[in-house]
Every structure is written in structure tokens, then in C-alpha cells.
Amino acid sequence: MGKVKDFSDIGGRHMVHLNDSTQSRNSFASRLAKKCQVNRIGNDWMTAGVFVPAEPKAKLAKKKRVSWKVTLR
């Protein structure tokens, strides 16, 4: 995603960088499990959805920022 400039509305929040790897998905699930109920039964959750960079908006492209979108299969 590149550098993220802090602003008051998200102070203290953390950015999560995801990709389609099993390691990335497992790490994300572990972080969620600290505060939420996470169902890791089976292996479908390891392949559901595709984590790919979204098309950058024109004005964001100049700053080289990339947002992410999730597409469920």
C-alpha cells in the first residue's frame, strides 16, 4: 500500500497487508481471533476470495498508493 499518512479518525488503528498466500491468510485470521470468533474449520477459507490490488484512482495513482479489494469466488 505504500506510506499511509495518519489522520485523527484512525489514530491507533493498524493497516493489514494481505495477499493470497496461506501464511498471510492465517496471520490475518489469528489477528481477528484475538477479538472475534473465527471459524477455521476446513480449508475453504484458505482459498475463498482473491486479494489483489484494486485499480488506483486517477489522483491516487500520482502518489503511488494502492488500495485492495477482495473478490469472493
Image (cartoon, rainbow, N blue to C red):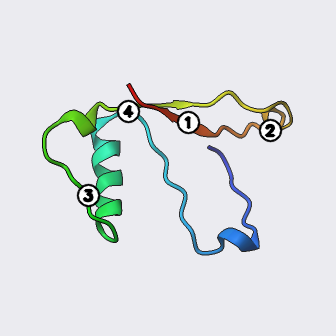
Residue 38's disc is 3
The mark that comes first in sequence, 1 or 3, is 3
Using residue 44 as the reference point, say whether residue 6 is left or right of it: right
Q: Quadrant of residue 61?
A: top right
Q: Is the residue 57 above or below the residue 28 in the image?
A: above
Q: What secondary structure is marked by label 2?
A: helix
Q: Amino acid at mark 2?
A: Leu
- Residue at 72% across, 31% down: 56
Mark 4 vs mark 1, CA separation in Å = 12 Å
Quarter of the image with the C terminus is top left
Q: Which residue is mark 4?
A: 20
Q: Position of residue 68 (x, y in %)?
A: 57, 38
Pointer 2 with pointer 4, Cβ within 8 A: no
The nearer-to-camera label among 4 and 1 is 1
Disc assigned to residue 60: 2
Circles 3 and 2: CB distance less than 8 Å?
no
Query: What residue is pinned by disc 1?
Result: 69
